[in-house]
Image: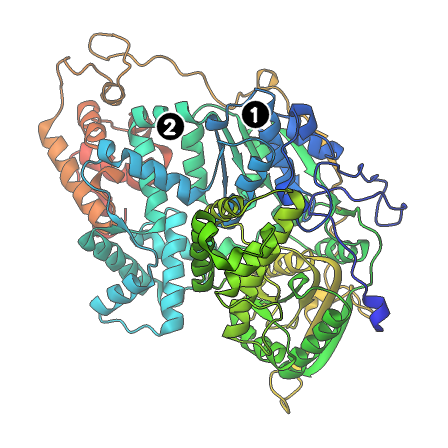
Amino acid sequence: MTPAALVRLRAPACGQPAQPSRATWQHGGVTAAAHSTLFPQGTGASAHAAPPSGADAVLEGLDPEQREVATSLHGPVCVLAGAGTGKTRAITHRIAYGVRAGVLQPSSVLAVTFTNRAAGEMRGRLRQLGAQGVQARTFHSAALRQLQYFWPKAIGGSMPRLVDRKIQLVADAAAALGTRLDRNELRDVTAEIEWSKVTQTVPADYPYAAAKAGREAPRDPAEITHLYAAYEDLKRDRAVIDFEDVLLLTVAILQDRQDIAEQVRAQYQHFVVDEYQDVSPLQQRLLDLWLGDRDNLCVVGDASQTIYSFTGATPDHLLDFRARHPGATVVKLVRDYRSSPQVVHLANGLLAHARGRAAGHRLELVSQRPPGPEPVYTEYTDEPAEAEGAARRIRELINAGVPAAEIAVLFRTNSQSETYEQALADAGVPYQLRGAERFFDRPEVRKASIALRGAARFGGNDSLLDDAVDLPSQVRAVLSGEGWTSEPPAGSGAVRERWESLAALVNLAHDLAAARPGVTLADFVAELDERTNAQHAPTVQGVTLASLHAAKGLEWDVVFLVGIAEGMLPITYARTDEQIEEERRLLYVGVTRARERLHLSWALSRSPGGRPNRRPSRFLDGLRPGTTPTVGHTGAGTGAGVERGTPASATVTPRRTQRTPARCRVCGRTLTDAGEMKLMRCEDCPSDMDEGLYERLREWRAVQAGRSGQPHFCVFTDRTLMAIAEACPQSPAELARIPGVLNRKLRSYGADVLAICAGQEPVGDDGGN
């Protein structure tokens, strides 16, 4: 390949319609949308453009399906969005259009996603669209705010300290049991505990739940049960909670305190959930409690990008959305503004051979980009040769004008990183590790921010700024005192990484000055503060090294997918059909990160001189030249479009039944107090509670709470136990009618409670629940 063939094409921002291209086999009859005037092309102007002039201007530049999303402001909406189709653009414009049109109050909207980076990007886009005041947070961040606010009212006292990392606590729990765990086992046991908690599995139920889910436990399941229980005991002894507890405790409070649940629902009227295919059962439970009996919910996702099932994520909530919400509007986004037709063709081909439920709902992407080069497939003798080959090609691309920041090397496991770090360093190519320290947390960035803030405040007395006439020259002058130079240092390593961080700030100053003439150093510092809060880092000029999981949500002009061999992708321990299909989806995510150029490679052996017993990944069969597919075709995917739901009034079985007023079972008065509603009687009306039964229930609850490591109220509140002792239910149906006894608790504790009410020993005394 000659350098002339490597001239870089500037891509529009993901989700931004490109100029129409001629119809090809890739376009499938879907016409390209008009070019957007809202976000001008270029590296910096779009980030600082003035907000649209009004609600209608927010809709400019959206394609027909994106516009449908933006204008569907009421009732349940499900957006099935393929990779690169502008889902974030569609939902942020939906929120902004609603706010600017006066339909949505900013403070009544809660948008949730899965990473701080994604939440920060959403806040930045909403700010740019003139929709300030909308809450855009991760599930954990939103739950933590509510838990901190309501803890004194619901529990009393100070909230336990939140631990950042649970792995040390797991190690301490193992030590207390006399169990030796190496580093890998420690990590894996921690992951099992996290999975258990997000799937709402208590320690005693772990063996059954893990077997049902097809999980391969890192140790004997009974041993993990003991480790999990010991971990929960240790947390309670140390008065700390972990991130999963944040969700669990928030769910418990909202379930058991109707008054608090109503207060939250009064605050938030409209909900938007991004990456809905990654929702765990626990997160879905929290979302249901936020919603109550309302349906102003918009979810966005793609079942073909479900790659986190090992954490408890499941696409079932997305795939079942229409069944749970018969009146939902479903919008399918398939116009791919990110990738060339050649990249999209490979992505569609990967999913065409997929199997399983998610495969049946796959979206057939239609590229809106000009044609690009075909994907390149390369076989190497060993892994070091593969790394050196990738580094050599990357060096050629950079020499031909492709910025290093627009190139990525993606691999299946983090252990593959070191070989590529060494190869890039040997080739003199700067790089950055994705998933390493966040940009604004880097020491050099923190120091630079302090220096810039000081210069903005007292710059008139700083001789460094005497000759600086505009923002870029002022920033260069200040950062020269922090180690920035006009030319990068030779080689790689820590010195080069520090320089790259400072250079990113200099580039940001140039972009801001180009977008906003007359901008001051104080304006630049304010921009940095906003970006720090949003974790919206400027571009660092280095090749990105990342795992396929860490690459989700990102994109580059050129992507090198390395190690695409059997045993690595699919990974060796992926054995079931479901696990194999998730590995296929992981490769699909990797392919769809590329805008223009895609390189796929594999090595026949691990080490030089090793036995060449590896073969290319089965996922490439039928896609790379000279091969045939090994699994059957599932048929064409679905195209773009809008499906209107059946109004709830027209359905045979309505989704929700109308609640009847709660009345006191003694005097018949309508009940409004949450506590009285739980007891099903007025506070002053006489109680017919069986005191002995109530005490037995309290003793049983203490045992259950001890086993699960949860506060007592997470099993049942005092009010619920009083209601049970008063009603003395004799059947599951009678028990289910008591407020506070939800389906999950009925399944977990129903048999025990009914046995106690019947004067028998609880069945869970043998170790179960």
Residue occupying the point 27% across, 19% down: 677
Pointer 1: what residue? Answer: 99
The disc at residue 724 is none
Pointer 2: what residue? Answer: 264
Residue occupying the point 86% across, 69% down: 4
Residue extending farthest to the bottom is: 609
Apparent side of residue 188 relative to residue 716 in the rendered image (left or right): right
Q: Quadrant of residue 612?
A: bottom right
Q: Give the colour scheme of this rendering.
A: rainbow
- In the rendered view, would you say 262 is above or below 623? above
Q: Earlier in the sequence, mark 2 or mark 1?
A: 1
Give how far across and how far down residue 475 sits, in percent.
55, 56
Q: Residues within 10 Å of mark 2 (few under 14, many from 20)?
A: some
Apparent side of residue 546 relative to residue 365 in the rendered image (left or right): left
Q: What amino acid is found at the position of numbered circle 1 in the picture?
A: Val
Nearest to the observer: residue 525 or residue 291: 525
Apparent side of residue 481 relative to residue 253 in the rendered image (left or right): right
Q: What amino acid is found at the position of numbered circle 2 in the picture?
A: Val
Nearest to the observer: residue 278 or residue 530: 530
Give how far across and how far down residue 91 sits, in percent.
61, 35
Whole-angstrom CA distance, mark 2 to mark 1, is 20 Å
Q: Is residue 441 visible?
A: no
Give how far across and how far down residue 389 sits, in percent.
70, 79
Dot 1: what SS? helix
Give how far across and how far down residue 422 sits, in percent.
58, 80
